[in-house]
Image (spheres, rainbow, N blue to C red):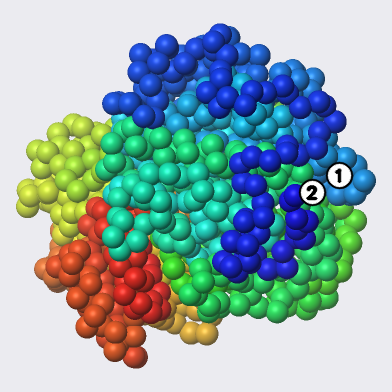
Amino acid sequence: MRPFRMAPARRLASAATITLLLGMTPLLGGTPAASAAQPSRCSDDPTARLSTVPTPENVLGFPLGAGQERVVTNDEVRTYLGAVDRASRRVVTGVMTTSVLGQPLPYAVVSNERHVRPAALREIADDVRDLRDPRRTSARTAARTAKDSPAIVWVTANVHGGEKSGADAALKTLYELAAGLSCAVAQRNDNLVTIIVPTQNPDGRDATRRQNEFGFDLNRDWFARTQQETDGKLELLRRYPPQVFIDAHEMGGRQYFFPPNADPIHHEIAGEAVDWINRIGEANKAGFGFNGACDETVTTECYFNYDTYDMFFMGYGDTVPTTGFGAAGMTYEKGSASAVADRVQQQFHTQWSTLGWAAANKREVLDGYFDIWTDALAQGRAGTLEPNEVVQPTNEVQFPVPDLSIRSYFLLPDRQLADVRQLVERLRRMDVEVYEVQKATRVPTARVFGGRSATNVTVPKGAYWIPMDQPQKHWIQAIMGEDPYVPFPYFYDVSSWSNPLLMGINTIYTGDTVRPRAELVRKVSGGRTGAAWPWGSYTYPLDSAAAAEFTFTLLGRGVPLVRDLTTSRVAIPAAKVSRTVDGLAESLGVTLTPGGKPAGTRLDLPDVGLFQGTGISTTSGSHGEARYVLGKRWGLDLKPVTTADINDNTEAFTGRTVLLVPDGSSATGGLTAAGQANLRDWIGQGHTYLGLRNEGTRVARAAGLTSTTEKTKPADYLVIGSHLRVDVDQESPVALGRPAEDFEFNNSDPILTPSTNGTNVLTYPTGDTFWANGYTVGAETLKGTAAVVDEPTGAGRAVLFAFNPLFRAYNENGLQLVANALLYPPNPPSARRTPGTDSARASAAAAPVTPDLGGGWRPITIQVAAGDLPRTRAIVERFTTDAQTSEKNGSAYVVIPNPQGLQVDEHPFARDLVRALNAAKVPLRSVVG
């Protein structure tokens, strides 16, 4: 008999407690959870199956798992889903979205025959959605749902295109659920509705490439949902909210990871979900087979836990289902060096074991699911944040969540209003309730984003209010919070993703109980506010990424635009504002205000060349981000420009008005002395060079376009995807529409000395206004350095970004700066500079090139006590001889170059190195990859 479990007061019971409870609890068998409907008739024969449902071998010509010799193609995935759908009454299929290249992303819903009937499936989904809102669902109704309804479990795979075995295993899971007659299958189908998404990235699967067609890592895109593959998936998740979510991956080696996770775990993840995750881990151990747990003697075809894979960043396929949907979201990773048959079979074993646990515990899970949202409401009402905790037995919380009360967020409408509205829509599309303030209200005590506080703040009419007293409290704090409050310094992604900071919008939050007069937002605002005279205009501020998209779209359609270079307002002739234009403005949140006759500087559509020469990856990073943002969203016709085009001065280069050089690995881009001279002459004619991060700034320096130099980072310097305050020189057209103080995102970017020949558009403050969030060490090194530089050459200029403003297409205030650079107005003759290199630029060009240790990402940095450096170095030397070591303030830092810019989960040895250090009991003070 299954013992009663109370919701855990802490996220993780002790290992001994879990073992004891699991010893008393049937993992995969036992009596199914109670159901109003009669359980399906079943067979004691585990091999009994319906002969009418085609086996994988019947359709594909080979088995899945044992005996499999190759992976399945996209066409075969779709073919098999269709064949099972036609043959089985337990299965319905659909398409959740299409890929960049137009491929469908199919899914299957599988359960017993009663559940998959359209009306029944809608009722199940409605009942589960109702559990997410205790304001409209009583405890009695919730208990009845837990008793009578199945839980919803998702099995997804192949979000990284080259990681293919999870998709094949998902097809095997589908077959077993669709055809099986055993009681184990009946238990799963009676107690669960299983959503199977074999591939989340079909374009990447075809190309055996991690990223999608635009070079985006779809497992970092979840909160921003910039890519259509992610966006469609999240809409289906809203339709069928999961209680358990599997995201099947591959990694290097021949081992297998499933949770319990590594630290850190985000503090707003509910304790119930973490408890389920850890107990599912025990079920996976029991069902894994092969060589069992990895140890010193068993190193292949075995499993491990508590290592590498954390639950912190809100862009993953485990954190978002867990935080945004209350599910037990889990990453499963299988070593890609194993044979296909072993990879697929192990993925199947964990999928099958997880489904078994969920079926056996579905009533408890649905009861706990209701509790998650009930607790969130109570916490939001009280202004309580969840505490930081760790799950790895050897770790301790290093950084607690501060004693802070948050009951409301307010998005202020004084600037970047279109981006404010885009954030409102992002929140609403995750079921967050947002209200528009109808009458100014006073907030007695407030915290202002950027580490400041204020009293008696007047929140104006038109601001947006996000009360925490709602079911999505956990999600609101997870993506809105000024700081994520990491409990333990282990990172293989970024340490900050605060959406207001990414957008650079004015935001305050308060622990006061305030109830402004406000109306629930039901659709995005924007478009015309009134009628202009036929000879007049409509104007809007070009101060946001959304307004930039509107501007480039209109220019691409041939609509004449002018811009006031003082106010940054753009005017459209009233006669050109059709219903279609008005609708576009509304969809983007851009307000069109009636005005007089259009006046200002004409805006021209830039002819942009995208550099893809030496050092540039065209399948990932900022090259792909440029193709997506500038190409797809802004509609610009990007022309490829190669190293040879510049060296030979071809029309492919000289015919452009802007050259964008993305981040890459080369300091010169392969340009010869003649090519560098061609580049200077081309800029001198009035054109714009736009350089991003490492390669973009270094090519400019080598060509004599800038007086900036690059500072060497100190040994203890760690800026891990953090936000920092910057001062804005509003004299540069690049800064049009930006406030005097702003925020920018820094991911261990190059540190640039200020320009002596141009305008330092963004600089890090030198005084007490310097501020950083996330996890930073030694960030003071940035004080007084430049983040964006605008240097003239002849009639043109080089605009250099030390950071990547296109990063994952969710750095909206950076995107607006890029738009300004692309729309740079012509320089008056008095402002022009003679082409060529002066002494400052010549000196910068001759300076030694700072080693690029991180490629398009970051180097791997391991911090230990100085006394532990000798044995740390000995272990590191088993993996690489390229590591650099240094000591400072009692700590030793081991920096491992990462020239390909690989993240830890795709790095050839970073994960194994950390595990070796842990096995040797070397205390790790921080790990950054």
Most extreme residue toward the left, as rendered? Answer: 673
Q: Position of residue 331 (x, y in %)?
A: 49, 48
Q: In this picture, is 553 found above or below 449?
A: above
Using the image, tell me which numbered label, if any, was put on residue 367.
Answer: 2
Q: Is residue 918 above or below residue 152?
A: below
Q: Compare residues 616 and 491 and report the one nearer the observer.
A: 491
**Residue farthest front in this picture:** 44
Is residue 782 visible in the rendered image? The answer is no
The answer to which of 540 and 74 lies nearer the viewer is 74
**At which x and y percent is residue 798?**
29, 55
Dividing the image into 4 quarters, which one contains the C terminus? bottom left
Q: Secondary structure at mark 1?
A: helix
Q: Of 694 and 152, which appears nearest the observer?
A: 152
At x 71%, y 29%, the residue is 190
- The residue under the point 86% across, 49% down is 134
Q: Residue at left 67%, top 23%?
A: 42
Identify residue type, mark 2: Asp
Does the rendering let one see residue 92? yes
Mark 1 and mark 2: Cα distance apart in space: 7 Å
Q: Examine the rendered structure and indicate whether residue 304 appears above or below residue 56.
A: below
- The mark nearer the N terminus, 1 or 2, is 1
Q: Locate residue 537 relative to residue 632 in the image: left or right.
A: right
The answer to whether 108 appears left or right of 65 in the picture is: right
Which residue is rendered at x = 79% and y = 76% of the image? 445
Q: Position of residue 183 (x, y in %)?
A: 65, 29
| Left or right of 187 on screen, residue 835 | left
Amino acid type of the residue that numbered disc 1 sits on in the rendered structure? Ala
Rendered image quadrant of residue 535? top right
User: Which residue carries the number 1 mark?
Assistant: 142
User: Do residues under tags 1 and 2 come within 8 Å of each other at their CB atoms?
Assistant: yes
Residue 497 is drawn in which quadrant? bottom right
Residue 793 lies left or right of residue 153; in this view the side is left
